[in-house]
Amino acid sequence: MDPFVRRFIRASVLWLGVGVIIGLAMIFWPMQGLSYRPAHVHANLLGFVSMMIFGVAYHVVPRFSGAPLQYPRLAGVHLWIANLGLILMVSGWIGRVWWRTPGELVLRIGASVSAVGALLFIFNIWRTLDAAAEPHPLARRVVSR
């Protein structure tokens, strides 16, 4: 397993923990808790779910397609960009509760950084699929009628 795959999966589990902690804060401090809902959702959805999908996809797509990942170093960059963007987003959502304008700014920067990370993932997977060898026409299975 490539190091960046392992790191994506570990980041995923870490974000699950962050989402659970924010969820507990929502339960124990219900007056502010509802305000933390977007941070809770993003930690779980973009953090846990997306990071897990990124890690698994980087591991599985090259094996299923028969082509190596086209830009493994870009996957490592993606790891850092995705996590930085998510840290800023979750911080921005929480910060908005206490300091509206700075929280909004941090949130917007984080969302932009996260979008760049997603685009890097799309590019890398797309190029990997493009590099996958097409089967030879004669190698196709003949279906009997």
Image (cartoon, helix red, strand yellow):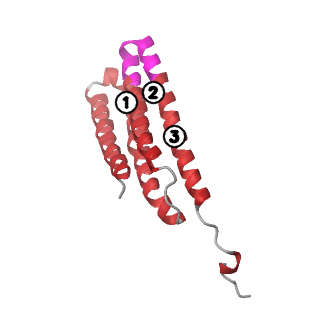
Mark 1 belongs to which amino acid? Answer: Ile
Q: Nearer the viewer, residue 119 or 16?
A: 119
Q: Earlier in the sequence, mark 2 or mark 3?
A: 2
Q: Is residue 134 visible?
A: yes
Residue that appears at 43% across and 57% down: 59
Mark 2 belongs to which amino acid? Answer: Gly
Q: Nearer the viewer, residue 110 or 139?
A: 139
Residue 117: x %, y % from top left: 49, 38
85 to 122, vertically: above or below: above
Task: Name the quadrant containing residue 38.
Answer: top left
The residue tagged 3 is: 118
Relative to residue 125, is residue 96 drawn left or right? left
Residue 102 among those drawn in magenta = yes
The residue tagged 2 is: 110
Q: Residue furthest right?
A: 145
The reply to whether the C-beta atoms of the residues labelled 1 and 2 are less than 8 Å apart is yes
Q: Quadrant of the C terminus?
A: bottom right
**Residue 87: mark:** 1
Residue 14: x %, y % from top left: 30, 41
**Residue 106: mark:** none
Residue interval drawn in magenta: 92-107
Q: What kind of element bears circle 1? A: helix
90 to 70, vertically: above or below: above
The CA span between labels 1 and 2 is 7 Å
Q: What kind of element bears circle 3? A: helix
Q: Nearer the viewer, residue 94 or 143?
A: 143
